[in-house]
Amino acid sequence: EPLPLLEIFAKKYGFETKLYPVPPAEMQNQSGQWLNVRKDKPDWMIMWGWGAMNPTAVKEAARIKYPMDKFVGIWWSGGDDDARPAGDDAKGYLTLNFNGVGTNYPAVQDIIKHVVSKGKSQTQPDKVGENLYNRGIYNSVLIAEAIRNAQKITGKKAITGEDMRRGLESLTITQARWKELGLEGFGAPITAVNCADHNGHHAAYMQQWNGKNWVKISDWISPMKEEVRPLLEAAAKDYVSKNAGWPKRTESCDKPS
C-alpha cells in the first residue's frame, strides 16, 4: 500500500487521509469498516484490494449508498467478478487498468476464431474480453516479445533463462508494435524498462463499471515517477542496509531493444 506516498501528498495538496484496514480474516465481512465510512463520509475512497476483499467492498459500498463514482480501486480490484456481484448498484465504480477490455481488437478476434470457436480454450467463451482474460493476453505479449527480444540480442533460437532476463530487461513495445500485433491501443508503449527498473512505471487509464462491463473513460495517465521512485529507492536501500550480505548485481545491462 502506498501509505507513505499518501501521507506526503496529504501535506503537499492539503487533504486528510484516513485508513480503513481490512485484515485477511475480515475480507468477506467488512461491515465494521464500511460503518465507519458511512460515519466519516470521506470525499473519495481508494481501495488497495485483492481477492475476495474486492467484491465484498463493492457490495458494502453500495449497501451504505456510498457514491460509486468516488470509489476508486487499484488494478488488482478491477476484475469483472469484483463488480458484477453488486449488480446495477456497482454502476459508476472506478478502477485503474493498463490493458484493453472487450474483444474489439484483431488479435482477440483471431483468438476467438482460431482457439475459442474450435473448442481449444479452457476458458468459457463469455469470459473472452473480460478484464482478467485480457490481462492474460497482455502478460502473454510481454513474455512473447521478451523471448523475441532475447533471440534478437543473442542470435539464438532456443534461449536460456539468462537470455530471457536480458530480453525482459531491455524490452520495448512501441505503439507501432502494438498495432502490428493486432492490439492497437491495447497497452501503453513500454519504453522505460531497464536493469535498474524492472517496472518502468508506465501509463494506466481509468475504467468504469456500467452495470455489465468495464468501459474506458480516460486517456492514458502517466505516473508521477518523480514522487514515487525516490520512495522506492529509499526503501530498497533501507532493506539492503538491514539485511547484510545482500548480493550486488554483477550482470551487464543491455540497451533497450
Image: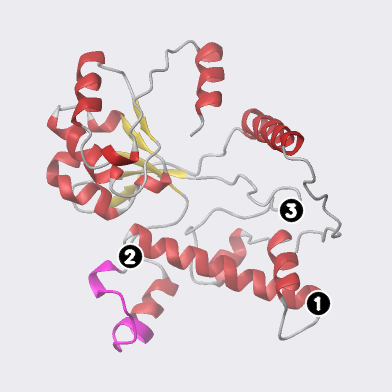
19 in magenta: no
Query: What whole-number distance in Å separates the C-alpha atoms at marks 3 and 1?
Result: 17 Å
Mark 1: which amino acid? Thr
Q: Secondary structure at mark 2?
A: loop
User: How many numbered markers are drawn?
Assistant: 3
Q: Secondary structure at mark 1?
A: helix
Crowding near pointer 3: few (<14 within 10 Å), some, many (20+)?
A: many
Residue 209 seen in the figure = no
Residue where numbered disc 3 is placed: 194
> Which color scheme did the rendering employ for the protein?
secondary structure
Against 113, residue 1 (above or below) is: above
Give the image quarter of residue 27. top left
Q: In the image as oriented, which residue stretches furthest toward the bottom?
A: 118
Disc on the earlier residue, 3 or 2: 2
Circles 2 and 1: CB atoms closer than 8 Å: no
Against 13, residue 210 (above or below) is: below
Mark 2: which amino acid? Gly
Q: Which mark is residue 154?
A: 1
Query: What whole-number distance in Å separates the C-alpha atoms at marks 3 and 2?
Result: 30 Å
Crowding near pointer 2: few (<14 within 10 Å), some, many (20+)?
A: many
Circles 3 and 1: CB atoms closer than 8 Å: no
Disc on the earlier residue, 3 or 1: 1
The picture places residue 107, in percent across and down from the top left corner, at 44, 74
- Which residue corresponds to the image point at 45% horizontal and 67% vertical from the top-left? 137
